[in-house]
Amino acid sequence: MITVSRREELDAILLQFEEEYEAHTERLSRLMARRGDRRTAVYNLAEIVACRQALARTARVLQSMADRDFGRCTRCTAELPVDRLAARPDLRHCSRCAEAVPA
């Protein structure tokens, strides 16, 4: 059973990534609307590609957070530390199981 405190911590992580997703979406919209000369086209394209990649990464994080097992080790079901989840939301194994799982 998940405690209220842990739920609040996980919700804070979710909010952080929802805000990040919104920021990437807004930035991509601005980049796509920008017009420039040919000299800046390559730079603009690189920015657009980087922004799309960041947006895709953030979308994957949000999708994994929607999983009802988010925050638990997929091997032993132990709760994953919230500070580690904040840094690496794609984390799937506790430190003990991560050592036992081949890379």
Image: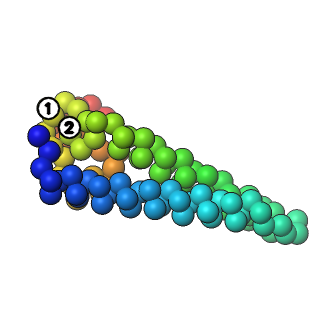
Residue 9 image offset from top left, x and y in percent: 23, 58
Residue placed farthest to the front in the image?
4
Q: In 3D space, how far apart are the residues under numbered discs 2 and 1 (Cα atoms)?
A: 6 Å
The residue at which mark 1 appears reads as 76
Residue 16 image offset from top left, x and y in percent: 38, 61
Numbered disc 1: secondary structure: loop
Relative placement, left or right, of 56 versus 14 is right
Amino acid carrying mark 2 in the image:
Cys
Residue 55 image offset from top left, x and y in percent: 55, 52
Relative placement, left or right, of 72 versus 46 is left
Quarter-of-image position of residue 49: bottom right
* Label number found at residue 73: 2
Amino acid carrying mark 1 in the image:
Cys
**How was this image coloured?**
rainbow
CB under 8 Å between callouts 2 and 1? yes
7 versus 26 height, above or below: above
